[in-house]
Amino acid sequence: MRHTLSVTVENEPGVLSRVVGLFSGRGFNIESLNVAPTLEEGVSQMTITTLGDEHIMEQIVKQLRKLVTVIKVVDMAEHKAVEREMVILKVNAEDTKRAEILRIVDIFRCKVVDVSPDELSIEVTGDHGKIEALINMLTRFGIKEVARTGTVAMKRALQA
Amino acid sequence: MELTGAQIFLECLKKEGVDVVFGFPGGAVIDIYDELPNYPFKHILVRHEQGAIHAADGYARATGDVGVCLVTSGPGATNTVTGIATAYMDSIPVVIFTGQVPTPLIGNDAFQEVDIVGITRPCTKHNYLVKDIKDLAYTVRQAFYLARTGRPGPVLVDLPKDIMQQKFEFKWPEDVSLRSYNPNLKPHARQIKKVAKLIEGAERPLIYAGGGVISSGAEDELTWLAKSLDIPVTATLMGLGAFPGDDPLWLGMLGMHGTYAANMAINNADLVLAIGARFDDRVTGKVSTFAPKATLVHIDIDPTSIQKNVAVHVPLVSDCKSALSALKSEMEPRLETVDWEVAHAVWVRQVQEWAETHPLRYKKSETEYIKPQRVVEKVYEISKGEAIVATEVGQNQMWAAQFYKFKRSKSFLSSGGLGTMGFGLPAALGAQMAFPDKLVVNIAGDGSIQMNIQEMMTAVCNNLPVKIVILNNGYLGMVRQWQELFYNRNYCETCMDAQPDFVKLAEAYGAAGYRVTEEKDLEPMLKEAFSNGKPTIIDVRVDPEENVYPMVPAGASLTDMLLV
């Protein structure tokens, strides 16, 4: 099963390689990872999406917590969470297809961010499901390039 | 007053109460060595940096204190990696200080530059590169704190040369606090009650003790628990000595080369208390058939150890000593209500019967060869079980573990997790440094002793009278045993009959050397060697084809033992 982990770390040199090295050294899988500073000085937030059964996830979370530079690990699967990813897609868009692509852009509430005579670049933000759906819809036109941020996530304020 | 980085560093070691530093100088640490004579601790100059780290490790294992190792940058640093990994696998507290090129040169492929922090990231508990002299004292403080608290382990601090030369005010940080590091020392009260209930209800309980018992100092609590409640005890290689090896409740080591009684007991127990042990594959054999009838309780300070290899029923994250103390308080009132001797009589009789019918044994020699097990037994007899025994890795290690009855903890020093050949001699030196008056014996093989034999010189220079008993069978014996049993006797590259003359080699180093080829000479020569006051090699020619039994083939169930 796919899990999103929110990992709060000390913002110091080498912290990323400690986390990544833990995954590679123990044979765990990273699907996406992003890191950025938080509001608190010296603290960064990593969001890691990974695949694993319950046993593997337990090990991943415990091993991450064991790292001296890791402050907190939250598995979003245990919470109600907002998850988003931003993706830019460059799609083939000859004149005959353009109207249809624009309609899809509209339905998915995406944004066209670049245009050329036979291509469209589309920016989309959404959860995993929405992005997969959009990619499915656009594949038949020919997706030439994709740039993805990887998931970011945050616990919802009201937890039942 | 302002001090140089080198002085600040050495002041920190003084504050940490360091007695001895095992090291090897070089350009990147020359400023530290320049100051060293002004400080009260002893520096042991080794002959190879791997010797320094193993010696610091041996010192830590024998004393329970932190071992300290100081080496230069580049090759000096990389030469310690095997020893760091060894300490990491066995959770031994050592702090390794490596020199580094000056900060402006870092990343420029400078002479003797290596990214040692990057290299040792997966085999240290934590590591540091000190980039600012302002951080130096606090970093050293943290390194010692991390090494000795929680689940102990090696911590490396990389010290750039220019930082050692800069000047700064020395201020010792009294307190250490790391918001992200809070080892869970106290057991959960409800879990303790649960375990007490399980012990009460169990008919066939068994204690499976590991190195965590020793590193937390829980030997007394463990012994109380076993003896008061009449629970048989087995231990891992790392746990040897945690429970007296001459007690009737002691079953010997379990696992691949464990005793018949220990392996049968784990197979039949209805309750297994795993204490400070990590269910290593050399212990469990085939995981799906490990302790099949038992409720498993697992006490460990490291949450990652729990549920890693084996699904346990009652996890208990805690320092072993506090957990066992809590369990003791919980069980004490039950001493009056339950007659534990009666409650466990059938079970204890059963395990003792296993021990009697299948003791550790070996066939008497039919040839002129001395049996290696006999050598270990003799070492035990002559030392009256009071020696500190280090081992190399292989058959010598297993025979030492099987045939030397360890009465107290910290008296068996062996590379368990990593299985590092070349560990024994330098580790023995570290232990001898800590206990100059004790008999320290390294039980070695002819193969593994050659991996760090240069440390004989360190022994001689520093008057460390370690005794190296080489069980010389002319083979890389453990691999040869596997080849014999599982690889159709294809003894590919395991024959080591081309050997140095170990007696002359000892003498060349200025040590004493003895050769034993006949059993009648064994006792007198060992006695002489043990009392000559010098570093000594005793080269004992043993049966070349002797095997370690019992043996559970890798991946088989513990009950599938090959016996003598």
Image (tube, coloured by chain):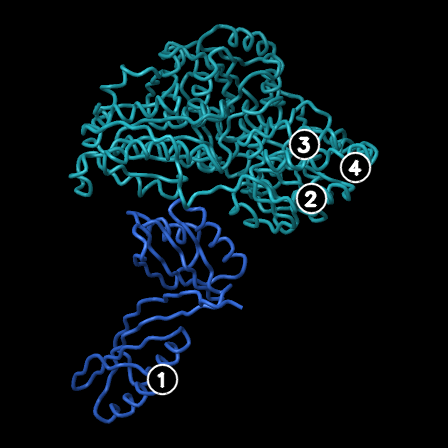
Q: Secondary structure at mark 1?
A: helix
Chain under disc 3 = B
Q: What is chain A's hue in the picture?
A: blue
Residue type at numbered disc 2 = Lys
Answer whether labels 3 and 1 touch (C-beta < 8 Å): no
The lab-note entry on whether marks 3 and 2 share a chain reads: yes
Answer whether labels 1 and 2 touch (C-beta < 8 Å): no
Give the Cα distance between marks 4 and 2. 23 Å
Please give the residue where the numbered disc 2 appears in the rendered image.
Answer: B193
Instruction: Indicate the position of residue A12 as horizontal and vertical percent values.
Output: 30, 47
B376 vs A104: above or below? above
Q: Mark 1 Cα within 10 Å, few/some/many (few <14, many 20+)?
A: few
Please give the residue where the numbered disc 4 appears in the rendered image.
Answer: B347
Question: Which numbered disc flags the more N-terminal residue, 3 or 2?
Answer: 2
Chain drawn cyan, letter? B
Of badges 1 and 2, the one in the foreground is: 2
The lab-note entry on whether marks 1 and 2 share a chain reads: no
A35 vs B108: above or below? below
Quadrant (top left/top right/bottom left/bottom right) for the N terminus of chain B: top left
Instruction: Indicate the position of residue A148 as horizontal and vertical percent values.
Output: 30, 69
Please give the residue where the numbered disc 1 appears in the rendered image.
Answer: A137
Foreground: A2 or B19? Answer: B19
Residue type at numbered disc 4 = Trp
Question: Which numbered disc flags the more N-terminal residue, 4 or 3?
Answer: 4
Of badges 3 and 2, the one in the foreground is: 2
Q: Mark 2 Cα within 10 Å, few/some/many (few <14, many 20+)?
A: some
Q: Is residue B326 left or right of residue A147?
A: right
Quarter location, residue A145: bottom left
Chain under disc 1 = A
